[in-house]
Amino acid sequence: MLYLLLSVLGNIAVFLAFRSFTKFKINTFPAIITNYFVCVITGSLYVGFGHIKSNISFSETWFISAAALGLLFVSTFYLMALTTQLRGVAVATVASKMSLAIPVLFSLFVLKIGTSALGTWNYAGIIIAFIAIFLVSKKKASIEVQAPLSIGYIALPFVVFIMSGALDTWLNYASHYLIEERIQGIYPIVTFASAFLLGSLLILVRRIKVTKKDVLGGLYLGIPNYFSIYFQIKALSAFDNNGALLYPLLNIGIIIGSTLFAILIFKEFPSKLNIVGIILAVIALILISV
């Protein structure tokens, strides 16, 4: 449970960093790309350059998997940004959060990890967790977002749903089949390095301006972001790669923690619907844990 808690705290720190971007008018995309570079440096310092040098291999399957995951990171974020522009923050948030269904179903019916150990109350908790996450993610639709009806307008939230779910599913699969203990700290470094290279290319091609504030935002985002993924991998290993249990617990922890910090720091109070979702999240947490 320690690694799960640390992953939750890392994700909450990421949430707080993102929330500050609006306040300080930091451009999200260049800050995200900078963050990937900071993740590489943070991970390298934490793991140790000597350990990386002695364990990295460009031809091994885990390295190829980690590099490809970095490409998925950037692509998913870019599409989330487009969804936010076309459909609003509420739609993008719900699509991203509800993607929890994909790694849970993958773990249950494809990997079939720990399914025999799950009881009726555990399954009930997982179902309630989906409802809770939907309610907490539900925000008022922005009236400022207006776009002509098109294939992209309709399909983008679905694509974000699929790709966001694919990220956690990929990580669950890699943790089960590819990631040995000796490379648990190296895997996210390779992933973030790949994401940084592709993101930097996009910045150059699209000629996106990068300011000092964007770099600063990426700096304080990157440190907790590396550890959020690193501890997620450690948590998966500790849960015997049972994503059906880990991901609902992880998301519920992030929801409850982020809501509390939003109230304390940003004075953002949840709606009645959000409060119902939080209560259901607590119930789901208890049921999943029994």
Image (cartoon, grey):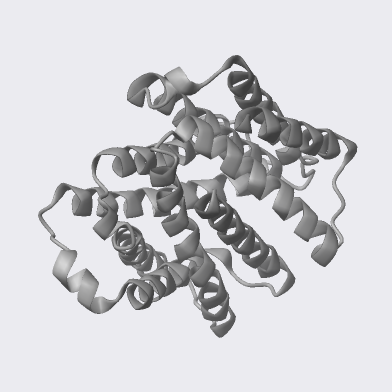
Task: Give the number of callouts.
Answer: 0
Quarter of the image where the C terminus is located: top right
Q: Is residue 52 left or right of residue 270?
A: left
Q: Nearer the viewer, residue 88 or 147?
A: 88
Residue 97 in sight: yes
* Residue drawn at point x = 37 percent, y = 70 percent: 43
Q: Is residue 24 left or right of residue 44?
A: right
Q: Relative to 95, does residue 124 appear above or below in the rendering?
A: above
List x then y, in percent, for residue 117: 47, 22
* Residue drawn at point x = 40 percent, y = 50 percent: 233
List x then y, in percent, for residue 38: 43, 74
* Residue drawn at point x = 37 percent, y = 48 percent: 72
Q: Residue furthest bottom?
A: 212
Residue 156 in sight: no
List x then y, in percent, for residue 142: 77, 44
List x then y, in percent, for residue 200: 36, 68
Q: Relative to 99, does residue 184 appear above or below in the rendering?
A: below
* Residue drawn at point x = 47 percent, y = 63 percent: 227
Q: Residue furthest top?
A: 120
